[in-house]
Amino acid sequence: DSGVTQTPKHLITATGQRVTLRCSPRSGDLSVYWYQQSLDQGLQFLIQYYNGEERAKGNILERFSAQQFPDLHSELNLSSLELGDSALYFCASSVGAAESNEKLFFGSGTQLSVL
Amino acid sequence: DQQVKQNSPSLSVQEGRISILNCDYTNSMFDYFLWYKKYPAEGPTFLISISSIKDKNEDGRFTVFLNKSAKHLSLHIVPSQPGDSAVYFCAAFNAGGTSYGKLTFGQGTILTVHP
């Protein structure tokens, strides 16, 4: 158990809909990262928040947004969903902002299926 | 643009033998490399890492070798055990840049260790 909690574990929805994925980091961790793993792809970095503020951005679509709340949990919002958004979405956390060689601790992921 | 590549989707090894997983990268700015292991229905877990100032790092049965001139790294597992059967992801990071922990992952290699 990594200590990172993601809910829900599975999500099935239709095209055009909006969903929210939730992540609670390990106790004491200030950074939260979101990654997307599509079929046959490695994990693709989406976005990082550190202590409530956006820290780094990857190839995150404009239809996607995220935020980190004062209690440090994070939500990833996916809107106007398309079939291609079907993927496994991982959240990870680390103690600091990861300027140095910090390990990331990953949750078990949310499997999103867009039908 | 796949900056980190794991060209072998799968590897099958006999218990007790050596497993060698390979990874190539194209971005010369990467200066820190990690291997993560992933079991089904779980998130990736950190296994071992290496800084670009080293060419080898060892941790128990796991050794990572880095060849900077070839932009190649490999993970050796000796001896291999059935419990090592998992997906192994190579990841790279520009610790000296402003990526703040943005890891670039390869596609993963499925390792199967047969008893």
Image (tube, coloured by chain):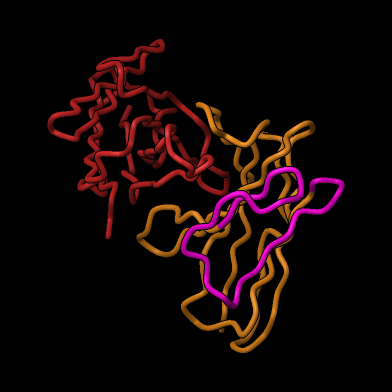
Chain colours: A orange, B red
Where does residue B115 sit, x and y in percent of width and height?
Answer: 33, 27
Question: How many numbered discs sit on the rendered protein?
Answer: 0
Instruction: Give the residue drawn at x 33%, y 44%.
Output: B110
Residue extending furthest toward the right: A71
- In the rendered image, the residue lying farthest to the bottom is A16
Task: Tell me residue B1's x, y (percent).
Answer: 27, 60
Residue at 68 percent across and 63 percent down: it is A66
Q: Is residue A76 above or below residue B51?
A: below
Give the magenta part as a residue range: A47-72
Establish if A106 lies above or below A11: above
Asked if residue B102 is among those painted magenta in the image, a careful observer would answer: no
Of residues B20 and B46, the one nearer the viewer is: B46
Answer left or right for B92 relative to A69: left
Left or right, residue B105 beside residue B25 = right
Q: Identify the residue shown where x is 38% and y is 39%.
A: B91
In the rendered view, does A63 fall on the left or right side of B29? right
* Viewer-proximal residue among A85 and A46: A46
Q: Position of residue B88 (x, y in %)?
A: 38, 38
Quarter in which the N terminus of chain A is drawn: top right
Which residue is pictured at 61% across the width and 72% down the height? A64
Locate the C terminus of chain A and report the quarter of the image it occupies: bottom right
A7 sits to left or right of B96: right
